Image (spheres, rainbow, N blue to C red):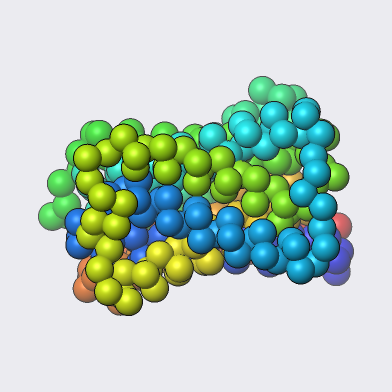
Amino acid sequence: MLSKNSIVGYSAGIITGITYGLNPLFGIPLMNDGASIDSILFFRHGFSVVLLATFLILSRQSFKVTPKQLGILLILGLLYTSSSICLFESYKYIASGLATTLIFLYPVFVALIMVVLRVYPTWQVWMAILATFVGVLILAQSDDTQTIDPIGVLLALGSGLSYAIFIVIVNSSRIIRPISSTMLTFYSLSVGMVIFYINTLLSPNDLTTGINGSSSWLCLVGLAILPTIISTATLALSTRKIGATKASVLGVFEPITAIMVGTIAFNEPITTNIIVGISIAIAAIIFMIIATKK
């Protein structure tokens, strides 16, 4: 039987992957309407911060942190902000499904960083990483008509690397361990909100340019709740319960969700490569959970 921590950790990791994979569903329509990336991400982070602050106040949690904790939280905020910027910028150069798929290479980055820190994954986890890597490569070749721009690929990989470092710090930093997942999410997103607001002030465009009607605002609220609040909070929870490497491998549900969104919302076809890639990735996840249970 899996332990309670494992059940919670694996479940949270799956939720993280699914919700983060919804980024294109809400972000692409806003970009198509002419909204700037800075405006989109400012409202995304701003709404998230307001909702989280309300929850923390109602639950009577203290916002107090030590100077050392604040320093780590600032770094986490910068990493999450960098990941968001690179992700949305990559949408300009490559298809959203491909961008999200490439970002999922971050489990490889996590494993390599953990090795540098002398934390060595088991052979079962290495097998799962290798299998999901192969599955993602197959997914990335799902559209033969797609032009792959190197700039978009580099931006997507940059997003994945920032995400990987974020995960490793959450997992390994003893300084922020006493901070709840909700509080960690609140401070991380607050950093991004400030950065994006400053960027919008420097931009010649108005803050709400391209954000028209209720559908646009619903997309922004959707971005704030699903791929931001829920995804970041469950990522922190999963990382703390089952470790950085396993939590990152569960992120395979990101490209799976992105592919499904592309098919349902943007009429992108499901090819044989997509089916094979998803099957390999899911099989790897099941193998990792079964082989490493205690």
For the C terminus, which image quadrant?
bottom right
- On screen, residue 143 above or below 66: below
Q: In the rendered image, which quarter is residue 8 located in?
A: bottom right
Q: In the rendered image, which quarter is residue 59 located in?
A: bottom right
Frontmost residue, 185 versus 66: 66
Residue 4 in percent (x, y) is at 85, 66
- 224 sits to left or right of 237: left
- 173 sits to left or right of 275: right
For the N terminus, which image quadrant?
bottom right
Q: Residue at x 58, y 46 (%)?
A: 190
Q: In the rendered image, which quarter is residue 33 located in?
A: bottom left
The number of numbered badges drawn on the structure is: 0
Q: Residue at x 32, y 76 (%)?
A: 214
Frontmost residue, 94 versus 47: 47
Residue 257 in percent (x, y) is at 43, 66
- Can residue 14 be seen here? The reply is no
Residue 27 in percent (x, y) is at 34, 60
- 289 sits to left or right of 36: right
Q: Residue at x 71, y 56 (%)?
A: 182
- On screen, residue 104 above or below 82: below
